[in-house]
Amino acid sequence: MSVIAEIIDTLENKVEKLILKIQNLEKNNQELKIELEKSAHIIATQSNDFEALKLQYETLKIANSLLGSDDNKRDTKLKINSLIREIDYCIAQLSD
């Protein structure tokens, strides 16, 4: 009987160790999920900031061209022509 008792004790110890490992892994998994959510939030925020800065850059580039800079004159002219076409289209729509 003592052999069976030793086997049971060993088995109980191994089960307890496995339960502790599972609990530690679940805790670690939860921490990693929280960290992942934070990282995803940071990435989304930075992406929005990037898009806003990109738009701001384009606006500044056009404004700079309008002020006399030769660097982006062609882009500015194209943008102005595009805006004029849009306005003409709107006027045509209103006339109908």
Image (tube, rainbow, N blue to C red):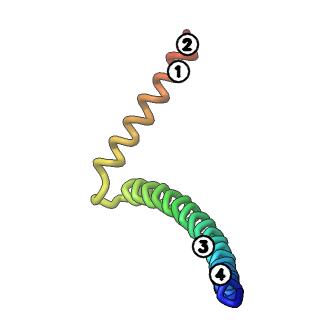
Disc 4 is placed on an element classified as helix
The residue carrying mark 1 is 91
Q: Is residue 86 above or below residue 1?
A: above
In percent of width and height, residue 84 lies at 43, 32
In percent of width and height, residue 87 lies at 49, 29
Q: Quadrant of residue 34?
A: bottom right
Is 43 situated left or right of 27 in this image? left
Q: At 31% from the left edge and 55% from the top edge, which residue is drawn? A: 72
Sort mark 1 into few (<14), some (14-19) or many (20+) by Cα contacts within 10 Å: few
Is 69 situated left or right of 8 in this image? left
Q: Amino acid at mark 4?
A: Leu
Disc 2 is placed on an element classified as helix
Q: Is residue 20 visible?
A: no
Label ID, residue 11: 4
Mark 3 to mark 4 CA distance (whole Å): 31 Å
Sort mark 4 into few (<14), some (14-19) or many (20+) by Cα contacts within 10 Å: few
Mark 2 to mark 1 CA distance (whole Å): 6 Å
Q: Amino acid at mark 2?
A: Ser
Is 85 situated left or right of 36 in this image? left
Circle 2/circle 1 CB separation < 8 Å: yes
Q: Amino acid at mark 1?
A: Ile
Q: Amino acid at mark 3?
A: Leu
The residue carrying mark 2 is 95
From this viewpoint, which residue is outermost toward the front? 1
Mark 2 to mark 4 CA distance (whole Å): 88 Å
Q: Name the N-terminal-most of marks 1 and 3.
A: 3
